[in-house]
Image (spheres, rainbow, N blue to C red):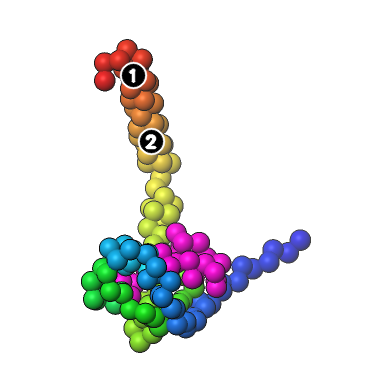
């Protein structure tokens, strides 16, 4: 069978006007925090991207916080760029820079010789053994009631 080449999807760019009126139903001190959560939920609703994969730019954050934590804007115009399963939120007029994923670790692993790889694996095993020993010591201390 012939292998199908993976197609790299081009970033999707969309513009929205998000109304923040529902956030005014919350107490004043928590409105800015709820506004950011509201933005993430809006993106999930429209693009089906989970909240942990939504990145909000500093300019958007500053725009929401400009009048303090109690007086948020009624609506905000945003530009959303979706690339590699992550959504980046920018203000409508802001220049959009999508952060690139770094592959330094993979390159380093490829360049290592067999001896170096073995040494790295040994270090990782020692770390794991040390963690296991610490956990067992904590459990023993808990049983004795010394902590």
Q: Secondary structure at mark 2?
A: helix
The residue at which mark 1 appears reads as 142
Does 43 lie within the magenta span?
yes
Q: Which mark is residue 124?
A: 2
As displayed, is residue 51 above or below residue 105? below
- Residue sitting at x 33%, y 66%: 31
| Residue furthest bottom in the image | 93
- Residue sitting at x 69%, y 63%: 3
User: How many numbered dots are placed on residues in this image?
Assistant: 2
- Of marks 1 and 2, the one in the foreground: 1
Q: Look at the image and give the residue range highlighted in magenta.
A: 36-62
Using the numbered discs, state the Cα–Cα distance from disc 1 to disc 2 in whole angstroms: 27 Å
Does 75 lie within the magenta span?
no
Residue 125 occupies quadrant: top left
Label 1: few (<14), some or many (≥20) within 10 Å? few
Sequence-wise first label, 1 or 2: 2
């Amino acid at each position: 069978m012939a292998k199908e080449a993976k197609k790299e999807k081009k970033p999707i760019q969309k513009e929205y006007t998000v109304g923040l009126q529902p956030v005014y139903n919350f107490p004043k001190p928590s409105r800015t925090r709820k506004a950011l959560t509201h933005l993430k939920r809006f993106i999930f609703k429209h693009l089906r991207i989970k909240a942990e994969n939504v990145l909000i730019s500093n300019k958007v954050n500053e725009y929401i916080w400009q009048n303090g934590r109690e007086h948020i804007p009624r609506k905000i115009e945003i530009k959303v760029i979706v690339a590699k399963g992550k959504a980046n939120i920018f203000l409508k007029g802001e220049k959009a820079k999508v952060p690139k994923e770094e592959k330094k670790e993979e390159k380093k692993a490829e360049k290592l010789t067999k001896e170096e790889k073995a040494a790295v694996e040994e270090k990782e095993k020692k770390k794991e053994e040390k963690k296991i020993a610490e956990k067992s010591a904590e459990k023993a201390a808990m049983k004795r009631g010394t902590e």
